[in-house]
Image (cartoon, rainbow, N blue to C red):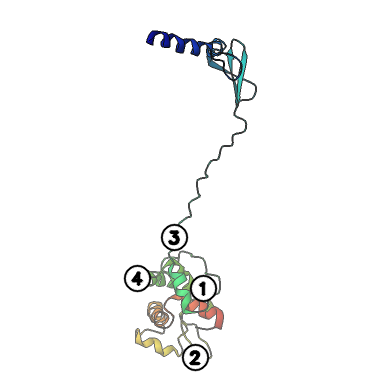
Amino acid sequence: MAVFATFAVLGFAAAYVGPMGSSISEAKAQEVPVSLYATALDDAQKFQTAGDDGIAAFDRGNYTVYVKPTPTPTPTPVAKKASSSSNSSSSGSSSGWTPPFVSPDPGTAQAIAFDMVMGRGWSNDDFSCLVALWNRESGWRVNAYNPSGAYGIPQALPGSKMASAGADWETNPATQIAWGLGYIGGRYGTPCGAWNHSQSRGWY
């Protein structure tokens, strides 16, 4: 009896008809072997596989690829180091123009002044401001005299003030320059500070 039941089940399975009207065995017979090699069509996003009954095509054209952009880094601000002429402009109103640097001729009053300016730790810009300032005041002449009583390269008022720098203040450019730089440093900080004040006020 058990043997009969087993044969009945196997027979039923062989005779089963699927929803499409064919048996499982017939469906397996109709499977199409697919080639493992794909060939590209004209559209680079479409591929086809060759089978016995025709071509099965796969289309990827509806896919959209999103690429997350790399953010542009924000540059870190770098503080600009101010030159001594920029620092000195705070001592007076800035004129917006600093005279250009010119090397002084050796042995001249300007050469003496250049060495003294560098000795104080001031810059080439400060020396340029000093040249322009004293060009305006005296033309760098040791004996420059103004009816107001101003005298010498820095136009000390009165000229006798320069005696604090040396007894030869009337004739020695080094003595006059030393006194003039001391006056500028004490009142304006740097020659560019004095130059800026002179530009805005007409005197220093």
> Label 3 vs label 1: CA separation?
33 Å
> Camera-side residue: 86 or 30?
30
State which tag comes first along the sequence, 2 or 1: 1
Q: Say which element carries label 4.
A: helix
> Label 4 vs label 2: CA separation?
30 Å
Residue corresponding to mark 3: 78
Number of dots carrying numbers: 4
Callout 2: few (<14), some (14-19), or many (20+) C-alpha neighbours within 10 Å?
few
Residue corresponding to mark 4: 119
> Label 4 vs label 1: CA separation?
19 Å
In the picture, the disc for residue 95 is none
State which tag comes first along the sequence, 3 or 4: 3
Residue 128 image offset from top left, x and y in percent: 48, 69
Q: Amino acid at mark 4?
A: Gly
Q: Amino acid at mark 2?
A: Gly
Q: Residue at x 37, y 72 (%)?
A: 116
Q: Residue furthest front?
A: 1
Residue corresponding to mark 1: 132
State which tag comes first along the sequence, 3 or 1: 3
Residue corresponding to mark 2: 149
